[in-house]
Amino acid sequence: MASATAHAAETVTLKIAHFLPGVAQVQRQVLEPWCEDLGRESGGRIRCQFYPALQLGGTAAQLVDLARNGVADIVWTAPGYSTGRFPKTEVLELPGMLPVGGLAGGRAIWTFYQAHLQDEYAAYKLLALHGDGGMTIHTANRQVAKAADFAGLKLRAPNRTIARTLTELGATPVAMPPAQMTEAISKGVVDGASAVWEVIGPTKLDEVTRFHLETSPDEPVLGATVLALMMNRKSFDAMPADLKAILEKNSGMVLVERFGRAWDATITATRDKVKAQGQAVTVLSGSAYDEVLKKLEPVTAEWIAQASAKGIDAAPLAAAARQLAPRPN
């Protein structure tokens, strides 16, 4: 973070890194407008410099270290990419925990963070913790509409919790970042991907898939990827008090809701686009949804056992997460 010498006119330039292309929604529709607001409210004293597509080096899983070590001032990433580093956060990625959608999911996640997860992010200044709208499945040649349809498929998995979910459904998960999904499907390395609607545009996933499966908006998602905007603690502490106040004002739930509105708009637009292309969108609901959720009960049980072995009070944590999206009667 660069600073001027005169405190009264001190400026900061925030280096912001993430793993998606610069044209992705997260930068164009959320972070760039957010930075514009910070600049306007600070009289131009807060500026942002973007490093998309891992331009500062490393992998998506290493972004958390770039923020912790100060290579970047701020990173946007999925904590779940850094396996085992944020074990309590994984409870939110389990089947049946979060409501569908960016706004509803984000609000639930931030509320849960404030009550249960603050210790996991104590090394950072956490600016936002939000969701991806919920696990969706995109396949090239086979339509997935019920539990049995997952059997034998090779599917990209975004985190280890969803990988475990796919395994329980009879699929073979393959870990890879979003940037590799489209090529992997086109070459037949995988049959499809667990990926949110938001990444379809920047990765051109719709050019290699024809079938899409999503959860009914009335039911909790089958899985999710939690996403975080994390700031280096020293970078934040070094900011003048008035600039800190501006950053604080524009972060937290306000920023979570900003992410959520952008995600929901893109979900709708992307779903409409693939339908207009003649692709099939299946909504998992009713008895088919119940069957899948029942089949996934061992995923939560296994997480509770593993987290408990690490000293986490896991069963109450899972029970609290389950209340974020209670099922309709």
Image (spheres, rainbow, N blue to C red):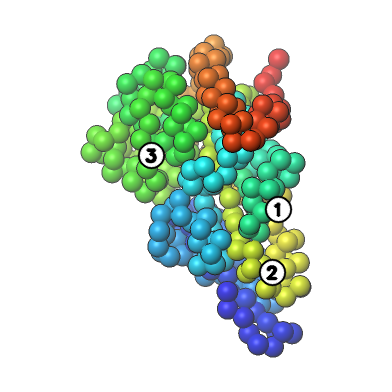
Q: As displayed, is residue 184 above or below residue 124? A: above
Mark pair 1, 3: CA separation: 30 Å
Identify the residue shown where x is 41% and y is 25%: 167
Identify the residue shown where x is 67% and y is 26%: 315
The x, y position of residue 265, in whole percent, is: 57, 44
The secondary structure type at the circle numbered 3 is: strand
Which amino acid, mark 2?
Asp
The secondary structure type at the circle numbered 1 is: loop
The x, y position of residue 239, in whole percent, is: 69, 73
The x, y position of residue 106, in whole percent, is: 64, 42
Mark pair 2, 3: CA separation: 36 Å
The x, y position of residue 94, in whole percent, is: 56, 30
Q: Which residue is mark 3?
A: 175
The answer to whether residue 234 is seen in the rendering is yes
Upstream in sequence: badge 2 or badge 3: 3
- Image-quadrant location for residue 176: top left
Image quadrant containing the N terminus: bottom right
